Amino acid sequence: MKTEEGQRELVMIANDKKRAERKKAILEDPEQKMKELEEVTESRAGTTATVILITADKVICANAGDSRSIVGRNWTTYSHEDPTDKAGESEALSIDHKPEDKVEQTRIEKAGGFVE
């Protein structure tokens, strides 16, 4: 199945098989499966998103979590081999929301959360 449609069909079959395996595992040992899911949830807790709105005269950026946005200016094809090439400039559009930052930790704790 080398066609695009054939590839999609193979992916669907594989996904159906994975779903069936997960259902079987949950039914066989639901407590163990819940522990595994809790571990995944705890180790991957968090949110990340970046949104940029560009209008005729403004660039508005909003971000949450561990995400970052920059804007590049005056970029051309850049070659490390050619010393006359000049890389463009970049400017941060967002501020990182890192839980270890005091301001961010305070915000999290005020919202009822915690930082370990």
Image: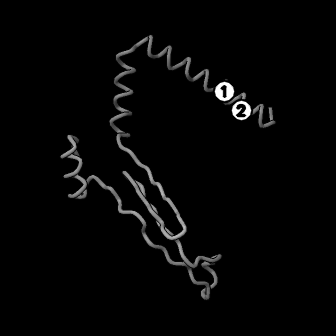
**What distance separates the C-alpha of mark 1 from that of mark 2?**
6 Å
Q: What residue type is labelled 1?
A: Met
* Residue tagged 2: 8
Say which quadrant the C terminus sits in.
top left
What residue lies at 35% left-to-right and 40% top-to-bottom?
A: 45
Q: Nearer the viewer, residue 59 or 39?
A: 59
Count of labels shown?
A: 2
What residue lies at 53% left-to-right and 72% top-to-bottom?
A: 72
* Secondary structure category for the residue under label 2: helix
Q: Which of 14 and 81 is in front in this view?
A: 14
Q: Position of residue 103 (x, y in %)?
A: 22, 58
What residue lies at 44% left-to-right and 50% top-to-bottom?
A: 49
Q: Nearer the viewer, residue 21 or 71?
A: 71
Q: How crowded is mark 1: few (under 14 residues within 10 Å), some or many (20 or more)?
A: few
Say which quadrant the N terminus sits in.
top right
Q: Residue furthest top?
A: 28
What residue lies at 22% left-to-right and 51% top-to-bottom?
A: 107
Q: Circles 1 and 2: CB distance less than 8 Å?
A: yes
Q: In which quarter of the image is residue 33?
A: top left
Q: What residue type is labelled 2?
A: Arg
* Residue tagged 1: 12
Q: Residues within 10 Å of mark 2 (few under 14, many from 20)?
A: few
